[in-house]
Amino acid sequence: MPNLELTIKSTKKFQSLLLELAQTMGFMIKILSENRIYQIINEVTGKSIFLYNADLGMNSSSSLLAAKDKAATYGLMSHYGVPTIEHIQIDTGPDSDYISECTKYLQDWGKLVLKDNEGTQGRNVFLVEDQESLLIHLDVLKKRGKRICVSRFYDAELETRCIVYNGEVRIAFSKLRTNSWKHNLSQGAMPIPIQLNSPESAEIQHIAVSAAAAIGMQFCSIDIMETSCGPKVLEVNGTVLMNHYTKYSEAHKNQSLDLYREIFSDILE
Ligand SMILES: Nc1ncnc2c1ncn2[C@@H]1O[C@H](COP(=O)(O)OP(=O)(O)O)[C@@H](O)[C@H]1O
Ligand SMILES: [Mg+2]
């Protein structure tokens, strides 16, 4: 067994955890590109996994691209009748009257969220309550060269993340906001586990499983906002990164590792 001599940056902690897990299961690890691309090999069966960071390559590239595109995800979920938060892409080209278009949404909805259509970790996500802030944030996003989408604002206390594997929710937790209006774990929200056998979580789990099926993903996380109009999908993540969840407690870490152990053995054995 080769020695795993990796200098994993702190941001890659979860990835190093996965590699450690694979190694303790007796699989060989090949570093194909320093700090990014790995192969996990079962030398007995000859089966292998190609890993890019923490992505195990379990979802198709078109599903991953669809999930990254918030407006497209909204369209897809709507097509399949999965309750979803509205995300509309805005054309900001030279011939477009995008300011009037966004102003109309602001008037209709009262409040809206302006975002980078392909953003992550809550970056470039702005709450807009008036015309002045609309103009400021449209300008910010345009100057940063981002594709813009507008989303109807829902005042939801809770956002729940469901990790779906093979058509079943395997881990679910609510994200409690702390020092931001956003529910991103990277912005300080706290993960509070949800019991999967509790009757109250049945509806959310059903939505998460339907969303994963709609986007055709085998392993993904689905974020669902608990709005006053019922639970609605906010976004789909095709790479399941549990770094914030695992560092929260030893129990959280073991829960995640158990799931990955199962996935590794499903793929490699
Ligand atoms: N339409 C919305 N209504 C209310 N809150 C929202 C809305 N869109 C985004 N948010 C808040 O902003 C956070 C980040 O938005 P999200 O669309 O998930 O982008 P990212 O992919 O960057 O995480 C969410 O966790 C949520 O708290
Ligand atoms: Mg998010």
Image (spheres, rainbow, N blue to C red):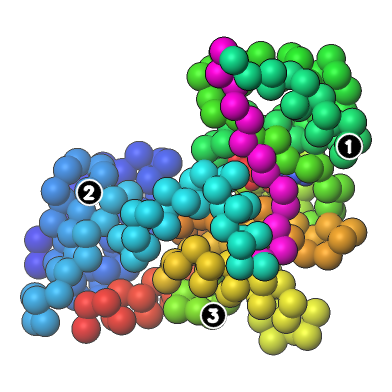
Tag on residue 37?
2
Left or right: 245 with respect to 108? left
Q: Give the alpha-carbon distance from disc 3 to disc 2, as whole Å.
A: 28 Å
The kind of residue on which mark 1 rests is Asp
Instruction: Provide the residue span drawn in magenta.
Output: 82-94
Asked which quadrant contains residue 79, the reply is: bottom right
Q: Is residue 179 magenta?
A: no
Tag on residue 108?
1
Closer mark to the observer between disc 3 and disc 1:
1
Q: Which residue is drawn at 15% across and 51% down?
A: 31
Percent of width and height locating residue 24: 26, 72
Mark 2 nearby-residue class (10 Å; few <14, some 14–19, many ≥20) = some
Q: Quadrant of ligand 1?
A: top right
Quadrant location of the C terminus in the rendered image: bottom left
The kind of residue on which mark 2 rests is Ile
Percent of width and height locating residue 131: 85, 19
Q: Give the alpha-carbon distance from disc 3 to disc 1, as whole Å.
A: 37 Å
The kind of residue on which mark 3 rests is Glu
Residue matched to label 3: 168
Identify which residue, 207 or 100, lies in the foreground.
Answer: 100
